[in-house]
Amino acid sequence: MSTLNSNIPAGELTNKWTKYKSSVPLVNPANKRNLEVIVVGSGLAGASAAATLAEMGYKVKCFCFQDSPRRAHSIAAQGGINAAKNYQNDGDSTYRLFYDTIKGGDYRAREANVHRLAEVSSNIIDQCVAQGVPLAREYGGLLDNRSFGGTQVQRTFYAAGQTGQQLLLGAYSALERQVGMGKVEMFTRHEMLEVVKVDGKARGIIARNLITGELERHFGHAVVLATGGYGNVFYLSTNAMGSNVTAAWKANKQGAFFANPCYTQIHPTCIPVSGDHQSKLTLMSESLRNDGRIWVPKKKDDNRRAVDIPEEERDYYLERRYPAFGNLVPRDVASRAAKERCDAGYGVGASKKAVYLDFTFNTERYGKIEANKNNIQNPDHATIMRLGKEVVKEKYGNLFDMYKQITGEDPYETPMRIYPAVHYTMGGLWVDYNLMTTVPGLYCLGEANFSDHGANRLGASALMQGLADGYFVLPYTIGDYLSKELATKALPLDHPAFVEAENKVKETLDTLINVKGTKSVDYFHKKLGLIMWDNCGMARNEAGLKASIAAIQQLKKDFWSDVLVPGTTDELNTELEKALRVADFIELGELMCIDALNRNESCGGHFREEYQTEEGEALRDDEKYAYVAAWENKGDGEFTLHKEELKFENIKIAQRSYK
Amino acid sequence: MSSLSKAFSSSIGKKVIMGITGLFLISFLLVHCFLNAFVFFNDNGLMFNIGAHFMATNWFIRAMEFVLMGGLLLHIVQGARLTFQNNAARPVKYAVANGQANSKWYSRSMGLLGTLLLIFLIVHLGNFWVVSRFTGIPTHDANGHEDLYAVMKKTFENVWLVALYALSMISLGYHLLHGFSSAFQTMGWNHKKYTPLIKCIGLWFSILIPLLFAIMPIAMYFNCIK
Amino acid sequence: MSTGNMNLTLKIWRQKNTKSKGELVDYKVANISPDMSFLEMFDVLNEQLITKGDQPIVFDHDCREGICGMCSMFINGRPHGPKNGITTCQLHMRSFKDGDTITVEPWRAQAFPVIKDLTVDRSAFDRVISAGGFISVNTGNAQDANNLPIPKANADAAFEAAACIGCGACVATCKNASAMLFVSAKVSQLALLPQGQPERYKRVQNMVAQMDAEGFGNCTNTGACEAECPKGISLENIARMNRDYLSAKFVSQEEA
């Protein structure tokens, strides 16, 4: 076990980034033209980084597995993006955003990184608006804000329920502009399958052309991974079907440590599973919790329809347990509370794995306000509800329609059924202050790294981090490394390192095709997902984790001896793509359990049943676990733990309370 | 290629040509229909022949006749080109296509409707235009004007021609029903306040003008007009 | 709850690669639940095919919640199937009846060549965007976001145009395989915002030129695109683009 150097600049927290920016070595324009950077992933972090690096003059190659960079899963983020603009004059500041993020992350994030994030948050909004991103506005023509879980100010900028889409399309247009100018070479339908290293430094990648199956060698003076999170290790999650850990996992095998893999965010408001056929889960925006009240029946196994259960027989358990924040507690708290009720037998719906999200109360409240506005004297209940429904429709119409489309139930008439689902992974490749992994020249941005959200991410912070990393952090910090690489010539593609890496990939592909077993890839993926959800999901315990490590090891053996991948390696073969991803998920799953087992405390998205207060709240152990667990992959399922101690010099570490 | 010719050869430019010529032809229809409606005076075609005489002798109208022919040709040629190009933009067709679920049949059938109208036009020009311009109108009316009305009466004694004229006016109606408002959309003349009005005018224009045209041969055939 | 009682006949386009000739192939699926999504029904079929040793059907899909724009099936003659305002991944089997025969084809257009089975190449859209679908502002060039107030009506209209997910349903359904709705949505979004003004006329010329070069057909205003667009992008955008294009070509003195 060793300690890690996070390369945090010295000095006052509030000055670190400013000072760093003015002292980081620069690369002159003539030299930038000769430096090549590979960016893998084209979501918020990848697209913004690729575009910005190209604008600065670097030669950029950008890769994505989808048919267009515009389809990266950042596009699905609904709610919004935080920024410490204080446009609402409600006392927001860089420090408050920093503080909320550290506290929301249950004191498991690095102070310097989070403060930098809060500092650049304002620039992101400026940049996006300048690009033509149509963020929501008020009648005066100025930007609108809303509030989100875990905060007491209105700092969330949004574009209806499509904030991620609009921000991504902004970054995508910046990227396509550079593509049009010939400064970025875009490789769509390509998947990175190996990091190529020379003398310990990242020097390129092996990518598979998904249409032809051809393996391609690409050189870069630096390689940037912006490949998103690994929530699909659970099979069912709100991630896109193609979201995967493969790029990060290959990097891990090449020496980039994987940090805090067990920190998983389970989002409280998702549409429940409807059957075995389920392929993915759909999130209902967290903003719904602003106006919906969450409840279950007070009686166990109550099979009455929601509307038939009288008010006094309903348990508004979040309001009961957390009077100060009520339905707006952070995601981890809300999710666990829902699981607790369902496990105790109070769940609703056919599966009993759901709770109600009820808009009746606020529909009525809005209706009364509207009646008042319209001077309707003594309105009857039907009128009030009709008026209220119009307000609710205006605010959440698209979400209600989506719910109805999926479940066949009308949420205007009956409460929504919701249940937590895997949504975001706080863990990821360990990076230092420069966003560089433990492999020199290999960088990691966005959800794929571990850096800013600690053990739990606050709503509307993922978009902020992805764009901060891509637009405003990496383009500066990468200069620190590239300024020392001016003399490095582009590697010839027949360099032994490329040949060796490609052969390794080829071998894996051939092995998978030649297993010719009896079970489809999905069969194994579903099995893995079940193990992970049951034992490494919302609640974990020692026995369960140990059992699941053994089960995953067995699953790995079964996979490599019994998987059935039809077709060949030299064609568009979606089953082969899935098989490669699932193979990596299986290995990652084991590491997640190892990490969860190592962390004998409860914090944020990691809840160990052994470590809770008498009231069932998470119990941290700051004495022993105020560190980042970074795992080195020794091969064959062996991992070595490295620690980065977290020092809180600017925030008083405290028990998180939302009561 | 110069900037302007490039503009006209672009997809939008080609459509603009269709739109402008279409609107021009619509204006011609209005004039044509107005003058032909003189037959309804029931004066054995005297008023009608005065109108026809004016049209045949006024230098401006004669000049415009060339513009009209040019516009018509352009509309036809460009329409045919667009239809072929659009066809080529989907070389492999769908096995199942459910167009009626999302659009009106006549808006998808402008090429077909246009072809029907072209056939009609050839017949129509042969019936009247060739006679009045080239072969000559054989008789004169009481005012001493060439009796185009008599040619009309004679022509519409043939029941097949009457049927062809009436049916072609149905084609014209549907062609206009799409073409009228479509021309405005193509020119970008779209406005929250005025577009509904344009659509309304387009609808009535597409019904009334072809209806009036269709009534003439039918009424003559049944001797309702004398 | 996991299995239902719907039995269906599927006629699905199979094509090995761009060059080969494809054909519709009949498949049967049984015990389909009305709660399944259309793509989950395809998952069931593919699982059947794989375990039988056959090649699964390749189709594009990713987010499965109607926003990434990747899924693209032409179902019974309509893009994204029989319902309006949704993508294929949001279509559920309760929209069909037991015993139905469903024909599934790829998007068909000269500009969208089939790659395999139901997967087509829509990179033409990316090239249209890279020809001008952006505002030229480098990172770090921006002023404070609230320095330019934008009338809410304009901001809302820009947002509605920006809702386009680039799925290509407009091209797929247009009898002319025209991309006018897609292109005009981006042109409109940026033309409605003050930030988009400096490049307004250059942008529309470049994007239309690229659109034409890609081999899309010409718009004949049938309105099918608007009716089938899962995001309800309006035909007004096409009128706006036409207007801007004509201004750019015949009024503006700037060459693209």
Image (cartoon, helix red, strand yellow):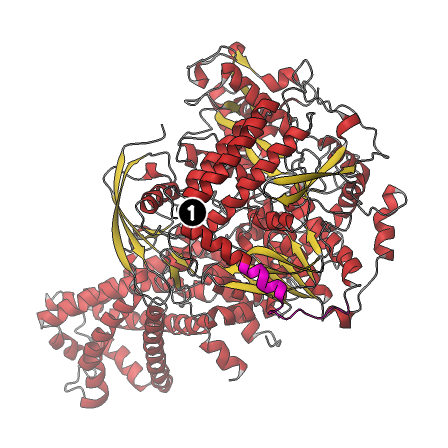
Is C254 a magenta residue? no
Residue at image coords 42%, 44%: A563
Q: Quadrant of the N terminus of chain C?
A: top left
Does A226 appear above or below A331? below
Could you tell me residue A9's position as x and y percent? 85, 48
Residue C191 found in image quarter: bottom right
Q: Amino acid at mark 1?
A: Thr
In this view of the protein, which residue sits in the foreground, B84 or A271? Answer: A271
Residue at image coords 74%, 46%: A121
Determine whether the residue tagged by mark 1 lies in a helix, strand or loop: loop
Could you tell me residue C178's position as x and y percent? 41, 64
Please report, as a chain letter, where disc 1 is located.
C
Q: Which residues are magenta?
A: A486-503
Does C201 appear above or below A159? below
In this view of the protein, which residue sits in the foreground, C180 or B207? Answer: C180
Tell me, yes or no, if residue A322 can be seen here: yes
Could you tell me residue C61's position as x and y percent? 45, 49
Tell me, yes or no, if residue B190 can be seen here: no
Judged left or right of residue A533, residue B141 is left
